[in-house]
Image: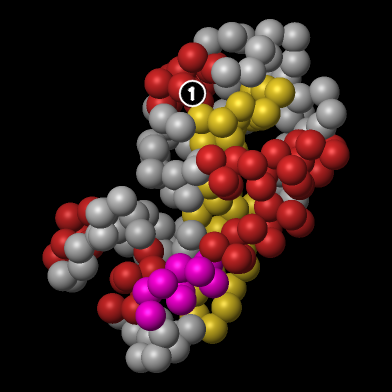
Amino acid sequence: MIDHRDKPVIALMMSPIDAEFHAKQLKPHAQEAAFVHIKDLEDLDKVTASGRPTRLISFCSPHIVSKELLERIRYNAVNFHPGPPERPGYMPAPFALHENDEDFGATFHKMLPKVDTGSIIDVTRFKIDPHNMTLAEVEMEAYKALLTMVVRHAAGLADIDFNFAPAGIDWTGRKTTRVDLAAIGFVKPAG
């Protein structure tokens, strides 16, 4: 783990390859920051216990951050959600295809203890063809949209004191869960 006792911390809760991408995009804007990959909530607990100024960036992460951990970092946390505001919750792409949505997207928002309720900062949308696109194709388009938003907001993400302004867009739709996913007959592949 990086020694970050003397530096502000940018905690990257995501896959290792996504953490590498984020660090590469943000480092030019935050030479003084320590970038720390967070693989699970135990890692986040350890990093936030340092008391150093911290910004948490969650990117396609399955982890739900507790109120206590968010309070510890003064709610300085943002999330990149692989679905539009109309599709909050777990794995939104299968639901979009199942319900024949004609568009999809990705949402960048502030984090609150209740999943997908924080102020929306940015949304990217794109057309989909639910009859001719596979789940992998829809998820790849959402992933590319998320990466584009990371690049667009890199300077703000790197400045842990920067306060993102809400875009004035509200979350809508029913928040989906793993149980809902099983109910539509979707079984998430292992791994």
Residue 106 at x, y = what percent? 54, 63
Bounds of the magenta segment: 134-142
Q: Nearer the viewer, residue 133 or 182?
A: 133
Q: Classify 106 as above or below 1.
A: below
Circle 1 sits on which residue?
44
Assign a secondary structure to mark 1: helix
Please give the name of the residue rendered at 84% of the width and 29% of the height, measured from the top-left corner. Answer: 31
Please give the name of the residue rendered at 54% of the width and 83% of the height, measured from the top-left corner. Answer: 127
Q: Nearer the viewer, residue 98 or 163?
A: 98
Residue 102 at x, y = what percent? 45, 85
Q: Classify 62 as above or below 87.
A: above
Q: Is residue 137 magenta?
A: yes
Q: Evaluate whether residue 58 shows in this view.
A: no
Residue 41 at x, y = what percent? 41, 26
Q: Evaluate whether residue 151 shows in this view.
A: yes
Q: Which quarter shows the N terminus? A: top right
